[in-house]
Amino acid sequence: MKGSIIATLGFLFILKFAYSQQEPSANASPQEVKWYSFEEGMKLAKKKHKYVIVDIYTDWCGWCKRMDNETFRNPEVVRSLNENFIAIKLNAESKEPIAFNGTIYSNPNPAKQKSTHQLAIALAGARLAYPTYIYLDSKGNNITGSQGYSQAEDLLPLLSYIGTGAYKSKTWKEFTGLK
C-alpha cells in the first residue's frame, strides 16, 4: 500500500514537472479570440497599428451568443482575428461611460432595460441590429460594418478583405471576383 502511494505521488510529480517545463510555441495558434474592452482595445490598436473589429452585442441576443459559440470558435476565424485585428466586445446596453475620439459616450437611461449606449449608436448609426460588427482602422476611422449572424465561411472573406488592407485598393467585387 505504502509503495503504491509513493509510486502515485512520484508519477504525479513527474507529470507536473513535465508539463510545467513546456512553454507555448511562438507559432501555436490560440484556441479563442482575444477580446478587449473598447477603451483598452482602441489604445492597443493605435499602439500596434492594427485594424479593429467591434462586436456590438447584448446579453439577451441569441444570435450574438451563437456567433460566440460557433463562428468565433472556428480556428480560421480565431487566427484571422488574433493576427490581423484587435477584437473588441461592446455591450450595446452597457451602463459605463466610454471615451472615444475625444467624446464621452454613455447610456442615456442606465436604469432602464434595453437602453442603448450612445457609442453603439454612434458607431453603427441606423444600421444597429444585434449582432453588429463595425470595422475600424487603427485610428478609429470607420471602414465598414455588417449585421447579423455569419458562419465562418461567410465571415472569413470579409476579415481577409479588411485585415490584409485590400479594401484600400480594390472594391469588394474585385476582391471576391463577383460580377
Image (tube, rainbow, N blue to C red):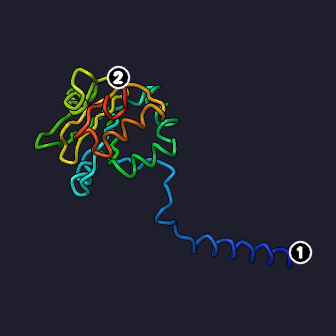
How far across and how far down the image is residue 36, in percent? Answer: 34, 48
**Residue drawn 22% across and 44% down?**
137
Name the residue beneath numbered marker 2. Answer: 179
**Residue drawn 21% across and 39% down?**
97
- The reply, left or right, for residue 161 in relation to residue 107 is right
Name the residue beneath numbered marker 1. Answer: 1
Residue in the foreground of this view, choosing between 163 and 99:
163
Q: Specify few, some or many for label 2: CA neighbours under 10 Å numbering under 14, 14-19, or 20 or more.
A: few
- The reply, left or right, for residue 132 in relation to residue 42 is right
How far across and how far down the image is residue 5, in percent? Answer: 81, 74
Residue 133, compared with residue 101, is above or below; it is above
Residue 178, compared with residue 81, is above or below; it is above
Instruction: Name the image quarter holding residue 117.
Output: top left
Q: Name the N-terminal-most of marks 1 and 2.
A: 1
**Residue drawn 25% across and 31% down?**
120
Instruction: Name the image quarter holding residue 59.
Output: top left
- Which quarter of the figure is the N terminus placed in? bottom right
How far across and how far down the image is residue 35, in percent? Answer: 38, 47
Residue 117's label in the rendered image is none
**Residue drawn 19% across and 30% down?**
122
Query: In what element is the residue under mark 2?
Result: loop
- The reply, left or right, for residue 130 in relation to residue 24 is left
Residue in the foreground of this view, choosing between 27 and 60:
27
How far across and how far down the image is residue 175, in percent? Answer: 33, 35
Residue 20, compared with residue 146, is above or below; it is below
CA distance for labels 1 and 2: 76 Å
- The reply, left or right, for residue 58 in relation to residue 137 is right
Residue 81, compared with residue 15, is above or below; it is above
Please name the amino acid that badge 2 sits on: Lys
Q: Residue furthest left?
A: 102
- Which quarter of the figure is the C terminus placed in? top left
Please name the amino acid that badge 1 sits on: Met
